[in-house]
Each structure stands twice: as structure tokens, then as C-alpha cells.
Image (tube, helix red, strand yellow):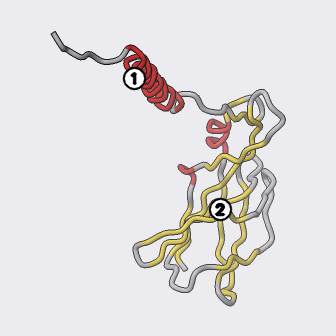
Amino acid sequence: MKKKGLSPIIATVLLIALVLVLAMIVFLWARGFISEKVEKGGVSAENACNDVSFEIQKGNAVPNGIQVQVVNRGNVHIYAFEIKEIAGGSSTKSVFEMAVDKGGASDYQAITLKRDTEEVIFYPQVLGQVSGTNKNKAVTCLEKGQTIKV
């Protein structure tokens, strides 16, 4: 009988490789459930978005853009805005550094836009602290976006 089987060394290496691949798959799958907890004033920063309320007013046109003023009517400090420019069916996102205290208003500030921008959506960002650390992280309130036609 000249039957050859799999070497025990090769079988062991294959089993270890299989276990490592399965462990990596489980880790990547579970990582989606575990995320950083960002808090603002003792509550989740996502819940702080419920207290965000603002008005955005369009001012004069400026070369390559527009001027905007923000009035913060909510109970939360707005840290910045994530803006989404929509032009010809495509869109681009960027961050517009404009902080507005709760109950306050900003001065008119110019925003540089792409040449063929049709509308701009402003999403407010609140700044929270990552739980258990001294790091801050901005959280975008996507449900509070406001649109301006250019």
C-alpha cells in the first residue's frame, strides 16, 4: 500500500491559517458594533443634535462664492459646518470653519464654491469629548441640514 496522506506539519499550518482568517472576519464584523462614544454635556453627541436649531442667510455674491450668516437659535454651540456642494448631479463635501455660540449670530463670511455649484447644504457640527479620553471629536448633525440655492 503506497498511499500518501497530508503531512502533519502542512495540516497544522492550514488549520492555523484557517483559524486566523476566521478570527479576522469575526473581528471586522464586530468592529462595526463597537464605536467611540462621543459625549457633549454628559449626553451622547448624537442626542445633542436634537437641540441644534439655526437659520442660515445668504448675503451678497463674492468672487467664486457667496457670503452667509448663521443665527444659532438652539441650546448647543455649533462648532463648524460640513458643507455639501451640489453641481451638475455630483456633490463634494468639505468643512467650513464657522463657530456660532448658542443664541448668537455670526458675521457674514465668504465661502468659496466651485464654478458650477447649484446649491449648498449646510450640516452643523457639534464638538464632543470622546468618552474616557481628553480628545475632542466633531459630530455632524445630518438631520439638521439646510439648503441654500446659489
For image coordinates 72% across by 58% down, the residue present is 80
Pointer 1 local density, CA inside 10 Å: few below 14, some 14–19, many at least 20:
few
* x and y, in percent, of residue 55 in the image: 65, 62
From the top left corner, tell me how far across and down residue 27 is, in percent.
Answer: 51, 27
Question: In the rendering, at what x and y percent does residue 99 appear?
Answer: 78, 59
Q: Is residue 10 above or below residue 61?
A: above
Q: Secondary structure at mark 2?
A: strand
- What amino acid is labelled 2 in the image? Glu
Q: Nearer the viewer, residue 125 or 25?
A: 25
Where on the picture, by quarter, is residue 81? bottom right
Residue 31 numbered tag: none
Left of 139 or right of it: where is 33?
Answer: left
Residue situated furthest right in the rendering: 134
**Picture residue at 26% right of the left edge, 16% below the top:** 5
Q: Earlier in the sequence, mark 1 or mark 2?
A: 1
Q: In front: 81, or 67?
A: 81
Residue under the image location 65 percent in, 33 percent down: 36
User: Which residue in the protein does label 1 denote?
Assistant: 14
Viewer-nearest of discs 1 and 2:
1
Taking the view exactly as shown, the residue that stands out farthest to the bottom is: 63
Horizontal relation, residue 144 to residue 7: left or right: right
Q: CA distance from mark 1 to mark 2?
A: 61 Å
Residue at left offset 78%, top offset 58%: 100
Give the labeled residue for mark 2: 55
Tell me the SS state at disc 1.
Answer: helix
Question: Relative to 137, is 114 above or below?
Answer: below
Residue 125 against residue 56 in the figure, above or below: above
Residue sitting nearer the eye, 55 or 68: 68
Please, what is the three-letter code of the amino acid marked with disc 1? Leu
Local packing at callout 2 (Cα closer than 10 Å; few below 14, some 14-19, many 20+) is few
Query: On the rendered image, what quadrant is the C terminus found in?
Result: bottom right
